[in-house]
Image (spheres, helix red, strand yellow):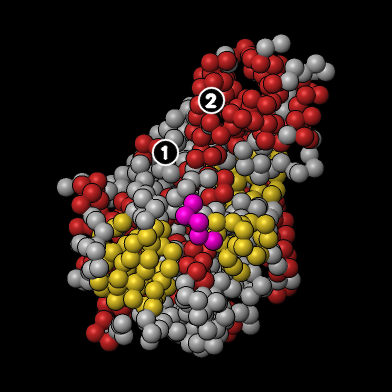
Amino acid sequence: MSNQNTFFALADFLIPAHGKMPKFSDVCGYADVEKSLDFRVDLKPGFARGIAVDPANGAEARLESLNKEDSEAFSAITTIAIATYYMSPRVRELIGYPGQENVPYDSKATQFYLTDGSLGHVIARGRKYRPTPGL
Amino acid sequence: MTVEDLADRSARARRDEEVDVVIVGAGPSGSVAALHLARAGVSVVVLEQGEWPDYADYTGARPEHELVSTKLWHPNPNVRDNPNDYPVDTSTTDINPLMFAGVGGSATLYGAQWMHFLPSDFRVRSMDGVAEDWPFTYEDLLPYQLEIEREVGVSGLAGDPAYPPRGAYPFPALPMGSVGQRGALGMERMGWHWWPGSNAIPSEKFGELNPCVRRGTCLTGCPEGAKSTTDRSHWPLALKAGARLVTRARVKEIETNEQGLATGVVYVDANGRDRRQRAKVVILCANGVGTPRLLLMSGGAGNPDGLANSSGMVGKRLMMHPFASVLASYRDPLDSWRGPFGQQVYSLEFYETDESRGFVRGSKWNCMPSGGPVGVSGATGSKVYVAESGRFQDFWGANLHENVARRFGHSLIWGIVGEDLPEESNRVVLSKDLVDSDGLPAPQIVYKVNENSNRLLKFNIDRCLESVRAAGAIETLVSTPVRESGWHLIGTTVMGDDPKRSVVDQWGACHDVPNLYVMDASTFPTSGATNPTATIMAVALRNTRRMIAERRNQKVA
């Protein structure tokens, strides 16, 4: 199995199809993975070790082994898998995530808590602080 | 003229030039001191080991944000691994100290929650019989607090009954999102205190600061230039007033003469060369870890315990505010990736001492959005919600999809900050093994969360769970104490009247070296339970005003 296919096997175990959500390899190509690694070059050594061994006994066994014996490689594989997946425009559309968006607002608009009485309840409950002794 | 032009024009002093004041650190306190001293006609050089921020490096508006920020903008310098920072030996601490080196200081990565200490914070011995009273009161500091708020551009709503009456905030409170509304609902159903969040984020254009657009990435640098940090709020004005700022300048020693007075500092410049900056007065603003580190590194061969340390208190009484967080998920959509991140709502319901609870002092809560899908999955990244004993399969496979579906866009986080009582056993020392990129000894943190803090956090977590469930939470996840939570570095060069029990006086002047000052949170006798930046900047302003007023009486070498 090529290193690329090894990663897809691991990533598809970590992120399988479930309900409306696609599995990893349905929405992410290896170019996406390489792009993520370029953002996190610190993860490249661990990532390389993680995909260097053919998961002959299956993806779960390989991940279990990495988790116990090479936590840096496990962290690199899982971090790249989950970050790449949730950067996918298709996945973001499915979960309703526009990214960290810009939300304009009117700074002078009257806030709801000033008109619905909720903040009035806080004020009505009275002073909370203890004043400075002797003043 | 732009800030960049001014920054370029700023340069180190001429060789052998003696300036009136050299300041170590261009974070919140150093920036305040520099601005006000320069405006008073004092010649000032500031030495900052980091660099000017490049706002294009802040990834908040880009798809790779969650991937990149967990490394590049991680608040732990040991994770960030940037040579401008120094590493910290954390082998002997329960909590990792968090900080950032650069113009603007650690506030570059703060949540911008803007809170004053309360009156009782200044009188803990008198009122609760623990620790020490401060040499001044809430009322003494309030005028400086309000002046700093105007410089910083704080947004908020006055009238909170948890505080004495005060004037209006400079800007209206930021809009409370669905997260804040749900957090407030729980508190309201319990009959507990809550108040719309006050934040060092102007809701309208203010000087070099842009209005907040609720990007929600405050903790990893604000790409909008909306979160108030002193590179934008203070430095443009300080440079115009004549202050000089040298970046990538790591101070390694404070020098003194035969009379024990400070004569300046030695620093390592960007090219690795040692340089000397002579000054009549030295001010340390290097945070509660960096300041004692520098004092312990100074003093020469005749002072093995460091400089200004006849009391033996330098480095001791470190307080870092033990922290807990409660994530709560709801069926209703809360758009919980939207900012402001710092605090949409805060609560001081359990701030004051109630001995029936089994501990002294109290806590402050702040309600925050839970962020993007990677963070709320609990599967990687900060691992805040991953138990060490957990199986990895619990967070992956179908569980990943179900966790994200339940939490993403549907959850909030209450952060619980507990007052940390001072203990001399919690301290900063110099590491015997670890060094920074210039070969200088790294600080080592020796710190244990004490029993009072453990009881305080447990009580508050239990109350918080009651609140979020009252508002309909369908899932709750608790993390405590959070190891990556040492945002607030306090107490390591304590102020006081007795030179045998304190390092500096109430104006920040060292008892042992009267022309050496400390103006960061190192001087605080106690920690309060609120975010300290407002108090740090106000105390720095109070000290600076005093220094200017008394400059003719200042003893110098």
Q: Residue at x 39, y 53 (%)?
A: B272
B439 in magenta: yes
Label 2 residue SS: helix
The kind of residue tagged 2 is Ser
Chain for numbered disc 1: B
Label 1 residue SS: loop
Quadrant location of residue B191? bottom right
Between B356 and B447, which is closer to the camera in this rendering? B447
Please state which of the two labelled residues, at mark 1 or mark 2, is closer to the viewer. Answer: 2
Quadrant location of residue B283? bottom left
A18 in magenta: no
Image location (x, y in percent) of residue B103: 36, 53
Image location (x, y in percent) of residue B300: 47, 75
Image location (x, y in percent) of residue B457: 69, 60
User: Pointers 1 and 2 in contact (CB under 8 A)?
Assistant: no
Between B444 and A112, which is closer to the camera in this rendering? B444
The kind of residue tagged 1 is Tyr
Quadrant location of residue B411? top right
Q: Determine whether B527 is above or below B546 in the image.
A: above
Q: Residue at x 44, y 30 (%)?
A: B62
Q: Which residue is mark 2?
A: A36
Q: Determine whether A111 is above or below B353 in the image.
A: above
Image location (x, y in percent) of residue A108: 33, 46
Tally of numbered discs: 2
Q: Residues within 10 Å of mark 2 (few under 14, many from 20)?
A: many
Q: Residue at x 55, y 77 (%)?
A: B305
Classify residue B246 as left or right of residue B424. Answer: left
Q: Which residue is mark 1?
A: B58
Q: Residue at x 47, y 72 (%)?
A: B298
Chain for numbered disc 2: A
Classify residue A117 as left or right of residue B328. Answer: left
